[in-house]
Image (cartoon, rainbow, N blue to C red):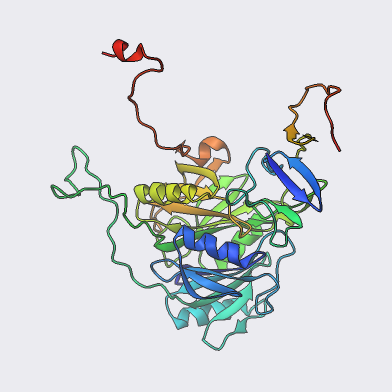
Amino acid sequence: MNIIGPDTLVFGVDDVAACARYLEDYGLKPIDASASGARFEALDGTGIVIAHKDDASLPPNMGTASMLRKTVYGVADQATVEQIAQELEKDRPVKRLPDGAIEAQDDMGFVLGFQVSVRRPLDLPAEAINAPGAPPQRAPNVVAVNEDAVALPRSLSHVVYFVPDAARAEAFYARLGFVCTDRLLGAGPFLRPAGTPDHHTLFLIQTPPFMKGCEHFTFHMGGPTEVMLAGTRFVNKGYQSFWGPGRHKMGSNWFWYFNSPLGCHVEYDADMDLHDEAWIAREVGMCADASQLFLFQQRDKWAPGGPPPGAAGAGERH
Amino acid sequence: MLVVRHQGELYGWRDACPHYGDTPLAWRKDAYLSGDRTRIVCAAHGAQFDIASGLCMLGPCLGQGLQPVALHIDEHINIRRQGEEETPHDQHR
């Protein structure tokens, strides 16, 4: 089934104003913002919708600390929506919405939507690297670093769920054509829907039932420098880094996770591997070494130079 | 660490969520509380803690608690390092 990836994540939050400020500072554009909530979009139209947790129009909460209420998948066409409806109607109610989208729950109780994707095609450069041995990717006099460069989230990349039964959860997504690209033993599978070559748009982590919900979501940036730049700007605005920056082994994407008022982490990621049907899934036991190639920590700018402390310092320098 | 003034009392807690043991709670500098200011919230996974007892009421670390930091208050607020002995000069509520 030609499912491309998540178009929208919907959250019912405790503090709408705080979440609105957070998502705007993260780099998403507010659409139709009001005191009751808004949609926050990346460059390609995918995005996050927030409303107050008591908003009656939201699907119900999961009874845990998670604030995620719905995951809306974008698919290639209305025929795919119908195909998914027919598959799911075999064993669960499928709600049909006036705009042609459908809504149903997965086997863990996560509310899902399926719609013709709202993604707009993007035409943007990737990060350009010069390296000996390879043709230059930047023409002479084209400067890579611009401290005023815009580094904005381009597209909703993936969402990670805590689930009480990862095997059963995975089996549901397999019915919809998601394949496992890699498996982190002790955690769960990385899943890729048929409509994208991205390593994963969904990762499942096995946890006790009281933890069920969203661990994090992330938007693709244009490259590692954009991740570093956007992340540094975010830190400098006072936001709390959680893990990163670093580069994952499975999926190869650069990552930088932050705490958030949406009840989950929010990540900047970039340069994820692409796969097709020929790929054979790897299995690695979950541990710190398996989770990253390397890990760094942001620090304030520093430069070498200047005399050692004390008046004698100047005379001792060579 | 964080110090919270709640209903006239001051509470000190180590800024470390019991979920992973040593990760910070805020989502932004000084932003530790729920919207209505009645609970401490960990901005990793939304865990909610009772301000006075530090107990996790909802979230991945359900039943666990924040580690208290002793506060000794006279005209200043003093934070006692673990293991130091009280002296007759210390005053606390």
From this view, report whether residue A36 is shown above or below residue A235.
below
Residue A253: in sight, yes or no? no
Query: Looking at this view, is A264 or B11 the one in front?
Result: B11
Query: Looking at this view, is B10 or A270 the one in front?
Result: B10
Residue A166: x and y in percent read: 64, 55
User: Split into 4 quadrants, where in the image is the C terminus of chain B?
Assistant: top right
Identify which residue is drawn at 52% across, 86% down: A100
Q: Describe residue A22's horizontal placement relative to residue B44 as left or right.
A: left
In the orientation shown, which residue stands out farthest toward the bottom? A98
Residue B85: in sight, yes or no? yes
Residue A221: x and y in percent read: 39, 56
In the orientation shown, which residue stands out farthest toward the left? A140
Residue A211: x and y in percent read: 71, 54
Identify which residue is drawn at 76% across, 57% down: B38
Identify which residue is drawn at 40% across, 15% down: A310
Q: Describe residue A269's horizontal placement relative to residue A175 as left or right.
A: left
What is the count of numbered marks? 0
In the orientation shown, which residue stands out farthest toward the front? B75
Identify which residue is drawn at 35% across, 30% down: A303
User: Split into 4 quadrants, where in the image is the N terminus of chain B?
Assistant: top right
Query: Looking at this view, is A303 or A10 the one in front?
Result: A303
From this view, report whether residue B57 is shown above or below residue A20.
above
Residue B54: x and y in percent read: 79, 46
